[in-house]
Amino acid sequence: MSSWLVFPGQGAQKPGMLHGLADAPLVRDCLAEASAVLGEDVLQLDSAAALASTRAVQLCLLVAGVSCARLLLQHAPAPAYVAGLSIGAYPAAVVAGALSFADALRLVSLRAELMQQAWPYGYGMTAIIGLEPARVEALLAQVHSEATPVYLANINADNQVVIAGSDAAMARVAEQARSAGVVVSKRLAVSVPSHCPLLESPAQVLAAAFAQVSVHAPRLGYLSSTRARPLQSAESIRDELAFNMCRIVDWRATLQSAYERGVRLQIELPPGQVLTGLARRVFSQGTTLCFEGARLDTLISLMQREGLRHL
């Protein structure tokens, strides 16, 4: 048995998320390093107004994930695996030792700017809850066209997917899904059409930037959320991080992959509890917890217990 740390994607952000972090030396060091690397006070990025920017959202998710993971791992044993959904792949890579925090900050800043510039308005993402992926794909095929592009972006659970594309196309798919008996369709707090071919060009630009950065083989198991398997080489992680913005995220398969590899303890790093909710069915024989709302000593104790079982 073993543990893993998971990092949420865009949509989990909330105002004040950096100001609410623990007042601990490691956290303060992360905030100071981020501010120095970016040349700005990162604590100015988590206001409601600032979080209207894709760049602010992605940087806040990176900083929150890395700082809280470092605080946890100061006393807890290393997890067997790490993984992240979308932008969450970046703090996962930092924690796994594959990418430096400074390089991650610079690359995430560029990533977000490229994504926002590619589709500045009229596009985004919508969650469809209540239909299996195959039925949603059938609806997408009816609506998708050059004028109304829309794609499957995330497979989060057996009956929960996320679509990405133009506002008009997503609205049509959501309407058809509701008429098919879907429980919920919800426009997400994401202003770009992530995880689909609409972001192939920005991904190519980001890949060129990655070519100038040192990436290392991970020291921890690093599960890809687009391939649902461990990545072991620096080049595979470089490719994953550069192109995950235009590839489908299969979080359902990633969860199953972790469970099949013996993971029985999942800890979700801040902010929120989206990934905890998605894991409960797969981890029905395990434990799923959020860093937020849990005592740090409890999380450390649970990781120590799983670490001993893994020996």
Image: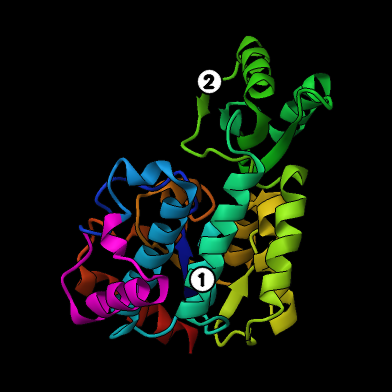
Q: Tell me if residue 226 is in the magenta stretch.
A: no
What number is the disc on residue 183? 2
> From which residue to which does the magenta span run?
20-44
Residue 235, picture quadrant: bottom right
Pick the front one: 93 or 147: 147
Q: CA distance from mark 2 to mark 1?
A: 40 Å
Whether residue 203 is visible, yes or no, is yes
What number is the disc on residue 73? none
Going 40% across and 86% down the picture, which residue do you hit? 308
Going 43% across and 60% down the picture, which residue do you hit? 59
Mark 1 closeness class: few <14, some 14–19, many ≥20 residues within 10 Å: some
> Left or right of 74: which side holds 81?
right
Residue 175, picture quadrant: top right
What type is the residue that disc 2 sits on?
Val
What type is the residue that disc 1 sits on?
Arg
Q: Tell me if residue 26 is in the magenta stretch.
A: yes
**Count of all numbered marks drawn on residues in the image:** 2
Mark 2 closeness class: few <14, some 14–19, many ≥20 residues within 10 Å: few
Residue at numbered disc 1: 106
Whether residue 86 is visible, yes or no, is no
Relative image position of residue 156 (x, y in whole percent)? 59, 44
Above or below: residue 8 compared with residue 31: above
Relative image position of residue 15 (x, y in whole percent)? 28, 46
Secondary structure under badge 1?
A: helix
